[in-house]
């Protein structure tokens, strides 16, 4: 059984796809499809987390007429719920459930070091059951 007291680092995705704050949509929308992921981390010039963009955000934005002028600031979520890299699996699970979010960035010193999604939990439960 998945030990919810363990560190979130045991199940979070660390191979992040990041995009620089201010980047135009046409320069990053292609990054999601090949990796089959659903969230991009938006960073400032110092590498600090400033937002998150989902595939849903991109889908909405691509329906706009001025698509070539759309930047990260237009579509990213800025009021983020994050947790420190020292958080437990239980901490993240509760945040996901309480806030009905699909992804929570994991940070260390204001920089994203991972991301946890509902998929990460499902995959961990699946591995736990077949192991």
Image (tube, helix red, strand yellow):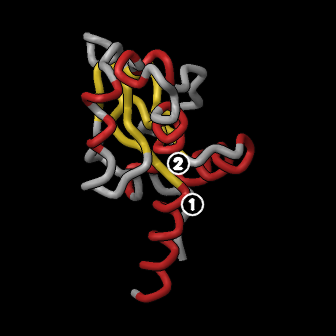
- Specify whether residue 126 is in view: yes
Using the image as rendered, state which of residue 56 and residue 61 is in the foreground. Answer: 61
The relative height of residue 6 versus residue 63 in the rendered view (above or below) is below
The x and y percentages for residue 29 are 33, 37
Left or right: where 54 falls relative to 15:
right
Mark 1 element type:
loop
Q: In which quarter of the image is residue 41?
A: top left
The x and y percentages for residue 43 are 34, 21
Residue matched to label 2: 88
Q: Do the residues labelled 2 and 1 touch (CB within 8 Å)?
A: yes
The x and y percentages for residue 90 are 61, 53
Q: Which mark is residue 101?
A: none
The image quadrant where one finds the C terminus is bottom left
Residue matched to label 1: 4
Q: Quadrant of residue 130?
A: bottom left
- Which residue sits at x=46%, y=69%? 124
- Which residue sits at x=38%, y=57%? 10
Left or right: where 128 falls relative to 36:
right
The x and y percentages for residue 61 are 50, 31
Distance from Cα at disc 2 to Cα at disc 1: 7 Å
The relative height of residue 109 versus residue 91 in the rendered view (above or below) is above
- Which residue sits at x=36%, y=30%? 112
Using the image as rendered, state which of residue 48 and residue 52 is in the foreground. Answer: 52
């Amino acid at each position: 059984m998945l030990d919810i007291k363990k560190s979130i680092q045991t199940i979070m995705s660390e191979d992040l796809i990041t995009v620089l704050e201010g980047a135009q949509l046409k320069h990053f929308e292609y990054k999601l499809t090949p990796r089959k992921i659903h969230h991009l981390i938006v960073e400032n010039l110092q590498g600090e987390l400033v937002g998150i963009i989902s595939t849903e955000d991109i889908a909405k934005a691509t329906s706009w007429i001025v698509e070539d002028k759309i930047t990260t600031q237009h579509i990213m979520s800025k009021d983020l719920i994050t947790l420190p890299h020292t958080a437990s699996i239980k901490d993240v699970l509760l945040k996901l459930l309480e806030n009905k979010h699909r992804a929570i960035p994991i940070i260390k010193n204001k920089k994203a070091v991972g991301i946890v999604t509902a998929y990460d939990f499902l995959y961990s439960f699946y591995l736990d059951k077949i192991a």
